[in-house]
Amino acid sequence: MMARAAKIEADTIPGDEPSAFHRRLREVVKVPHHVLDHHPLMAALLKDGVSHDDYGNALAALRGVIALTEAEILRYLGQHPGLFDYASRIKLPALDADLAELQRPPTAPPAAGRRIRNHGELFGTLYTLEGATLGGQFIARHLRKSHPDDLPLRFYLIYGDAVRDRWRAFLDAAQMHCLPAEFPAAAAAAVALFEAIGAHLDRQQADMAVRSMPR
């Protein structure tokens, strides 16, 4: 999911002038984004000869934190009808379908996640998820080269050809609804989600290592 955005400028589309929201968030996530890109489970997806197990491990590890985060987004939006249409962007069913095709059982979500308390935190959380979907196109291209026919890519390619239009629509909504006074909350939420994903991947990697030990 967390593609190496620097490779394709995951949060910038050529010709687009970044909004104030976009500029602020893009700057603050550079370091945590880089750290997550280089997590062993994610970095494995971009190596030559990536295996089915590598891919399944990454998706299985991501599943829990995606489930928890999307549930929290929908909870908050349920209290603010019309603020943003995330129902048409939900990624968990696509992720679960890929895991089922790979014959990998879904993993449980973390015990607890960060609450979304205001519009700033909502759009900061969405920035991380939607930016990762845009950047995930680089991962998908690499996986298609390595495995042209036999890897399910519903999760990474969930928006199809509309991925850039959906990124623009998200940024427009964020600029409209996230006031400058809320930018610090948005930035903190975006960074916190990167860090939460990394911590969850660490736990999943440790669990995988234990399960693979001889008994």
Image (cartoon, rainbow, N blue to C red):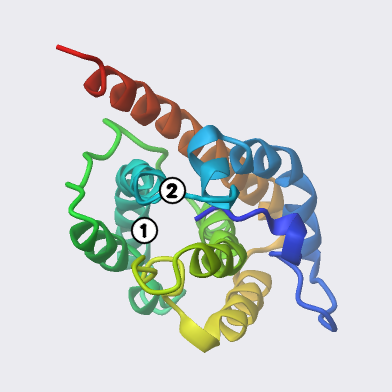
Label 2 amino acid? Ile
**Mark 2, secondary structure of its residue:** loop
Taking the spot 45% from the left edge, 72% from the top edge, the residue there is: 148
Taking the spot 40% from the left edge, 42% from the top edge, the residue there is: 115
**Residue that extends furthest to the top in the rendered view of this protein:** 215
Residue 56 percent location from the top left of the image:
33, 49
Q: How many marks?
A: 2
Tag 2 residue: 116
**Mark 1, secondary structure of its residue:** helix
Estimate how packed mark 1 is, as few (under 14), some (14 to 19) or many (20 or more) residues with alpha carbons within 10 Å. Answer: some
Residue 132 percent location from the top left of the image:
56, 59
Label 1 amino acid? Tyr
Estimate how packed mark 2 is, as few (under 14), some (14 to 19) or many (20 or more) residues with alpha carbons within 10 Å. Answer: many
Residue 184 percent location from the top left of the image:
70, 46
**Residue that extends furthest to the front in the rendered view of this protein:** 49
Instruction: Out of 173 and 11, give the one closest to the viewer.
Output: 11
Label at residue 182: none
Instruction: Out of 93 and 187, give the one closest to the viewer.
Output: 93
Is there a contact, CB below 8 Å, between mark 1 and mark 2?
yes
- Kindly tell me whether residue 21 is visible in this rendering: no
- Kindly tell me whether residue 130 is visible in this rendering: yes
Taking the spot 41% from the left edge, 78% from the top edge, the residue there is: 85
| Position of residue 184 in the picture relative to residue 61 (left or right) | right
Q: Quadrant of residue 43?
A: top right
